Amino acid sequence: MKFKLAVAMLSLSLAAGSAVAQVKPDDAIKFRQSGFTFMAWNMARIKANVDGTYNKEEVIKAANAIQAIANSGMGALFVPGSEKGKGWKDTRVKPEAFTDKDGFAKVATAWVQQSNEMAKVAATGDAAAVKAQFGKLGETCKGCHDKFRGD
Amino acid sequence: MSGHRLLVWDLPVRLFHWMLVLCIVGSVVTGQIGGNYMVWHGRLGLAVVGLISFRLVWGLIGSTYARFSQFFPTPAKVVAYFQGRWQGQGHNPLGAFSVIGLLALIAFQVGSGLFTNDDIAFNGPLQSLVGKDFSDTLTGWHRQASNLLIALVLLHVGAIVFYTRIKKEHLVKPMITGWKDNAEGEPARGGGIVAFTAALVVAAVAVYGASGAWLPAPPPAPKTVETPNF
């Protein structure tokens, strides 16, 4: 847990550092958008299960996918030159994501933490706990949207 | 010139006002927190649709001082007010701006909110009627306008404090009791049970329309909701 956090923080602060292959800005934006869009599918799956008939296995799959994306070191994709530009569509990232590195790392770390917790809770199959944790996870999505994503 | 006790705000206006206060505070708080509170954000939004619709109708057929035609701030009235010549009851010409501005902005907030999505787990009840791109645009406006709304509410409250402390005119008590002390003028008339029922019906229809309950149900989920293991 602590280790995962440290890795997440490190990957964010180092950005496209030494061990990471240099990604072209256009590609970086595409990878970012793909990751977030894929996550949207998995968020919708958890929501559908929480609101409707609960299927433990489905929620586990979705939560694991979100956890994997959150822990993939996406911070590395915020490379210089990708402040503006078009991936699959125009990026909505705010310049603050590149200047306020501490603030960015903070919201991202909260997201990683809550998605780890989401996967843990999903494994228990406790629908009520999953619903509560899903809300907490959603708050961390919003935490970044509000600060680092333009309208 | 000592006046008498005067009925200015009818009961529906007062109930509307204080229910709106609760709903707006609740909407702002739930909107800021997000997460599972978005469910309540949506419910409060629908309540506000009802309240605003009611008030718009009540502004046409309600009692004397509830009517837009009575307090609409014409340039002549505004000039007279600044020159200290304005005499009247109900909303003064500046207060009228506050009322109309808040009503319009809140109407915009609930109107846009119906079509929003937060890219997390919340969709406005009518979101499916517009494309994702336009929904995103409206979501942006909805977010930006919330700051404007907070500012207008603070201005509204600030003005009340100003009138109370500086001009020694108490505005809060009449909005609670309906009565204004030492006032000259005609008491509020009209806005009986028929008008009230009509406004209530319009509000109910508006909430039903905004709730999206009339939209065709999404296709039933397949019996097996499981995805394959690859």
Image (spheres, coloured by chain):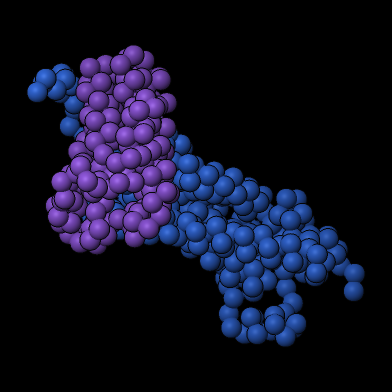
Chain colours: A purple, B blue
Q: Nearer the viewer, residue A31 or A18?
A: A18
Residue B112 relative to residue B189: left or right: left
Determine whether A10 is above or below A102 in the image: above
Where residue B135 sits: x, y (%)? 28, 53
Determine whether B67 is above or below A122 in the image: below
Q: Nearer the viewer, residue B4 or A58?
A: A58
From this viewpoint, which residue is outermost toward the right?
Answer: B2
Residue B174 relative to residue A78: left or right: right
Residue at the spot 36% in from the left edge and 15% down from the top edge: A126
Q: Nearer the viewer, residue B153 or B34?
A: B34
Where residue B214 sits: x, y (%)? 29, 40
Q: Examine the rendering and report whether any part of residue B212 can be seen.
A: no
User: Quarter of the image holding residue B88?
Assistant: bottom right
Residue at the spot 59% in from the left edge and 66% down from the top edge: B98
Q: Examine the rendering and report whether any part of residue B86 can be seen.
A: yes
Which quarter shows the N terminus of chain B?
Answer: bottom right
Residue at the spot 32% in from the left edge and 44% down from the top edge: A12
Where residue B230 sits: x, y (%)? 9, 23
User: Quarter of the image holding residue B216?
Assistant: top left
From this viewpoint, which residue is outermost toward the front?
Answer: A18
Determine whether B73 is above or below A128 in the image: below
Where residue A146 sits: x, y (%)? 40, 50
Residue at the spot 74% in from the left edge and 77% down from the top edge: B87
Q: How many marks?
A: 0
Residue B196 relative to residue B10: left or right: left
User: Quarter of the image holding residue B144?
Assistant: bottom left
